[in-house]
Image (cartoon, helix red, strand yellow):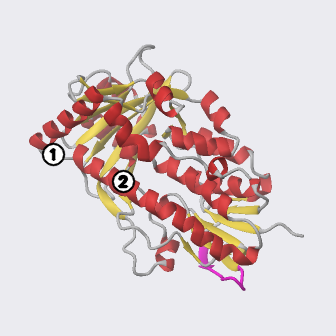
């Protein structure tokens, strides 16, 4: 009997992890990526313990841990460098069983690709239309390089997906969150530097460890969507001017051509479902969120594991299985989108009073940690793979 066939639209972390998860439960997969290649952008990922549990389900967790730098679940300072809240990697391990792991986005993409058949990835393949299919008809995916028939389609083409709009015509789609962030990977200036995020008025700045002698630095700012500067390096430097060391030095050390500006879009209004016919939505396509909780990639990885868990049995029942997938994911991810948006609103506020109230509240949480911090992070970090929570016979 032929393997059931899934077409994955989008070769980012969400698409590649879904492809791998499906491959592990017996599906043939075709990944359609419109870019000419999977380029390792100069971006980093901070993978919380729940993301690592999802990676463990894909047998990738240990490799990620080996190639990443550990970090605590929270390390926050004021603009002047004074600590507001700090939870070490050791305390994070004791509470959640893992530290936060930081690595380059391209490294995780490469690990996922290594575990897929070489023939699975089709680059420079733009999808022009999708027919969802139903219990009696397969789905169809039209691309500029040819068409595919599929028992399942995984839509993972990002926050501003045009295909999602065609599936949910009455949904408003992703909206601009009101801010952008500038980031770069730079050499580590000193061996024993402190890592974490710093909060100011109208934005944040931060620095995270990477393997070797590199760090990832970033800063946010309230700007209109779509603006581009001929010198994004200067914009990064402006955002951290007058902030505590070593943030200005790190920004200055970035190669101008390596600085990336990323506008932040999120799906502020929840979708009615994460499926339509034989199409499943995963990652940012389903529930793009602001980066403030550090859960974008984590939720995409969770989606992949849960989707593969529900897709089993006869291919005729794929639409029914996708209803179960939607039911399992919609409530959790919608709540995290809203929680992340609330945190974004607080840290991007230009108000001096709001900033003081915010910092005081965070300091209270820090002083009462681990009790209050555990209560705040429990809905995020306590996720378990359905494979590992299934009752034993």
**What residue is drawn where x is 42% and y is 47%?**
379
For the record, the magenta segment spans 127-138
Query: Of tags 1 and 2, which is closer to the observer?
Result: 1
Provide the residue designation for mark 1.
350
Q: Is residue 32 left or right of residue 189?
A: right
Q: Is 113 located above or below residue 74 in the figure?
A: below
Q: Residue 263: which numbered mark, if any? A: 2
Q: Which mark is residue 268?
A: none
Q: Could one spot residue 37 in this view of the protein?
A: no
In this orientation, which residue lies closer to the viewer: 87 or 390?
390
SS class, disc 1: loop
Looking at the image, which residue is at 39% across and 30% down? Answer: 207
Q: How many marks?
A: 2
Residue 118 falls inside the magenta stretch: no
Q: Position of residue 385 (x, y in %)?
A: 60, 49
Is 48 on the left-hand or right-hand side of 309? Answer: left
């Amino acid at each position: 009997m032929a393997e059931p066939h899934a077409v994955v639209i989008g070769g980012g972390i969400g698409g590649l992890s879904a492809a791998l998860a499906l491959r592990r439960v017996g599906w043939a997969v075709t990944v359609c990526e419109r870019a000419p290649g999977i380029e390792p952008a100069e971006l980093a990922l901070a993978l919380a313990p729940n993301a690592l549990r999802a990676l463990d389900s894909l047998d990738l967790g240990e490799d990620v841990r080996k190639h990443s730098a550990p970090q605590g679940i929270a390390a926050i300072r004021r603009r002047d460098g004074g600590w507001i809240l700090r939870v070490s990697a050791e305390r994070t391990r004791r509470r959640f069983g893992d530290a936060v792991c930081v690595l380059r986005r391209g490294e995780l993409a490469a690990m996922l690709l290594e575990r897929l058949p070489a023939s699975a990835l089709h680059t420079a393949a733009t999808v022009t239309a999708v027919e969802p299919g139903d219990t009696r008809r397969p789905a169809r995916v039209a691309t500029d390089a040819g068409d595919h028939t599929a028992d399942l389609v995984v839509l993972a083409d990002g926050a501003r997906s045009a295909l999602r709009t065609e599936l949910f015509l009455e949904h408003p789609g992703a909206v601009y969150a009101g801010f952008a962030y500038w980031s770069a990977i730079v050499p580590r200036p000193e061996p024993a530097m402190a890592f974490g995020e710093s909060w100011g008025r109208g934005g944040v700045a931060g620095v995270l460890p990477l393997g070797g002698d590199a760090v990832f630095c970033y800063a946010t700012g309230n700007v209109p969507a779509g603006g581009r500067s001929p010198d994004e390096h200067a914009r990064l430097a402006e955002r951290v001017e007058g902030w505590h060391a070593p943030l200005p030095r790190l920004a200055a050390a970035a190669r101008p051509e390596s600085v990336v500006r990323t506008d932040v879009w999120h799906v502020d209004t929840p979708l009615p479902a994460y499926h339509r016919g034989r199409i499943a939505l995963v990652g940012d396509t389903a529930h793009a969120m602001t980066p403030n909780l550090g859960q974008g990639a984590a939720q995409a990885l969770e989606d992949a594991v849960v989707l593969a868990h529900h897709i089993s049995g006869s291919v005729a029942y794929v639409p029914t299985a996708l209803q179960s997938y939607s039911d399992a994911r919609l409530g959790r991810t919608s709540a995290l989108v809203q929680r992340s948006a609330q945190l974004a609103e607080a840290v991007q506020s230009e108000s001096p009073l709001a900033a003081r109230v915010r910092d005081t509240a965070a300091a209270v949480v820090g002083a009462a940690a681990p009790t209050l911090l555990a209560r705040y992070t429990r809905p995020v970090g306590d996720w378990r793979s359905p494979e590992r929570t299934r009752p034993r016979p």
